[in-house]
Amino acid sequence: MSVFAIVTSAAAAAAEEAQGEAASAGLPQLDPTWWPSQLFWLAITFSALYWLMSSRFLPAIGGAIEERRDRIADDLDKAGDFERAAEEAETTYNQALADAKAKAQGIAADTRAEMDAEIARLQAETDEKLDEQIASAEARINEMKTDAAAKVSEAAAETARAVVETLIDEAPTAEAVERAVESAARG
């Protein structure tokens, strides 16, 4: 006898023994006499559960999934709209920033030009005042030179008169002293 036959006969003997024990132990689900009624109720229960799942639960779950899918799609569309709005706002911001920079540079250039003009005006006024002061100082210097030259001439004339008078004991005329001082100053 083969090993397979021995194992099969041992399994059959064990099954018969288990059936006998099951029937005697009061387990009707293992007793083949009750199997047709169990199969009947299994078919009814399976059909009822299948009908409930297909008509109630699965459509509700499918609807929830579809609703969720629609909500996600709507959220993605809104996110796309927000992204476009943000990009437009960024573009508008960058344009406004560039305009503000250009305007600030224009204002700075205008202010710089105004300040340069004011500085030039103040410098012209200062130069004019300095020119007036220089002219006034030069006039005073010329006046002082003239006065000094006159005083020197006068001092030279008095000195010459005093020297001539001391040397010859005679006072020379004012005209002669002036001529002598002028000729000495020229030569």
Image (cartoon, rainbow, N blue to C red):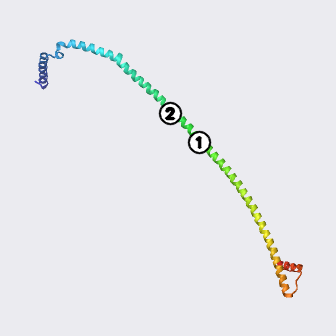
Q: Choose between 10 and 90: the one closer to the eye.
A: 90
Q: Residue at x 81, y 75 (%)?
A: 151
Q: Secondary structure at mark 2?
A: helix
**Mark before the other along the chain sequence, 1 or 2:** 2
Q: Is residue 56 left or right of residue 22?
A: right
Look at the image and tell me whether residue 161 can be seen.
Answer: yes
Q: Is residue 111 left or right of residue 175?
A: left
x and y percentages locating residue 58 in the rendered image: 35, 19
On the rendered image, what quadrant is the C terminus found in?
Answer: bottom right
Q: Contact (CB < 8 A) between labels 1 and 2?
A: no
x and y percentages locating residue 106 in the rendered image: 64, 45
**The disc label shown at residue 83, or none:** 2
Q: CA distance from mark 1 to mark 2?
A: 22 Å
How many residues crowd around disc 1 within 10 Å: few (fewer than 14), some, or many (20 or more)? Answer: few
**Residue 117, placed above or below residue 39:** below
x and y percentages locating residue 73 in the rendered image: 45, 27
Amino acid type, label 2: Glu
